[in-house]
Image (spheres, rainbow, N blue to C red):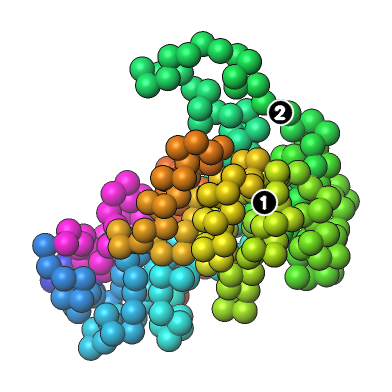
Amino acid sequence: MEDKKQMKKIGILESENFSTLVLHNLSKYFQIEFYDEKCTLKTFIEDKSVIFVRLKYQITAELIQNSMIEFICSPTTGLNHIDKSLHNKVICLKNEFEFLDTIRATPEHSFGLAVALLRNYKDAFLSIYNTEWNREKYKGFELYQNTIGIIGFGRVGKLLCQYYTAFGAKVYYYDIDSTIQSKIATCCISIEDVISKSNIIHLCANYTDENREMIDAKYFHLMEKKYFINTARGELINEDDLLDFISKGKFKGIAIDVISTETSQSNIADKLIQLSVDKNLIITPHISGATYTSMCRTEEFICQKLLEKLNYIEGS
């Protein structure tokens, strides 16, 4: 084995609960270092050949300027956190359809949020902060024979469709790709069409520059007295329109897992939390894809791709 001092360095930017199998495999070929914020991110990256990043840090062109970076590994499908000019260096999950079909964390969370909204779980769970045993106060609704609208019928949308169909709900969908077909759901001709036919609306679309803030006041007005769930991307929504609609109590229920700026400087989360006090509003901090199972498996998959690209191992 090559002397550790001669090995290229790989930087793990978010080491908490990082796959031990990946660390073991990487240690055969790299000198591994973990970022602990004792120095600047730019200084840490300077002597690294590879970095592994989840979603916490923004990787800009300026950040890796004059560095030795060959590859940026990100076990994600979206790359909002990485400058477009760097995408030629990125190893990620985009278009890895066969593998991603086995990763179910996001559709499971999306489905769970819908159940939580229908059954008023946010307020109904009893604790030392809520001791009122009153079943009438928290009476909810069922999925059976309910109507579901899915905007964006890709991997997550199709899996959600399977879950809802198993529970006896009627599913409608819209996707920009008009060639997408389903034997268990009904295709709609527009976003307006899918919203009008549905009681529970899921936003599952991929984010691009072209569809930024695609869901705005025009569509929110069609969702009045309905349920809306976004586990896709915050950038897909006009958040000013969203906050206004929530503040007026127009939704029957709403769940938000993503916002456009997921940093400590963002005040969107604070505004949502304030609005949730007396609304059927659930906010989760982008945890839809964050399970121990999914994160370890995606890190292992990205590690495999990296080692194959470097010709350290043969592709399977």
Where is residue 50 shown, x and y percent of the image?
Answer: 31, 73
Task: Spot the residue most to the bottom.
Answer: 66
Where does label 1 land, which residue?
A: 202
Quadrant where the image shows the C terminus? bottom right
Q: Measure the C-alpha gap from mark 2 to mark 1.
A: 17 Å
Q: Earlier in the sequence, mark 2 or mark 1?
A: 2
Which mark is nearer the camera, 2 or 1? 2
Write the start and end of the magenta stretch as one range: 10-37
Residue at the spot x=83%, y=59% of the render?
193
For residue 1, which quarter of the picture?
A: bottom left
**Secondary element type, mark 2:** loop
Which is more toward the observer, 163 or 4?
163
Q: Which amino acid does label 1 sit on?
A: His
For residue 105, which quarter of the picture?
A: top right
Task: Spot the residue most to the top.
Answer: 133
Please determine whether, in this image, residue 27 is positioned above or below residue 18. below
Label number found at residue 141:
2
Q: What residue type is labelled 2?
A: Phe
Q: Is residue 20 magenta?
A: yes
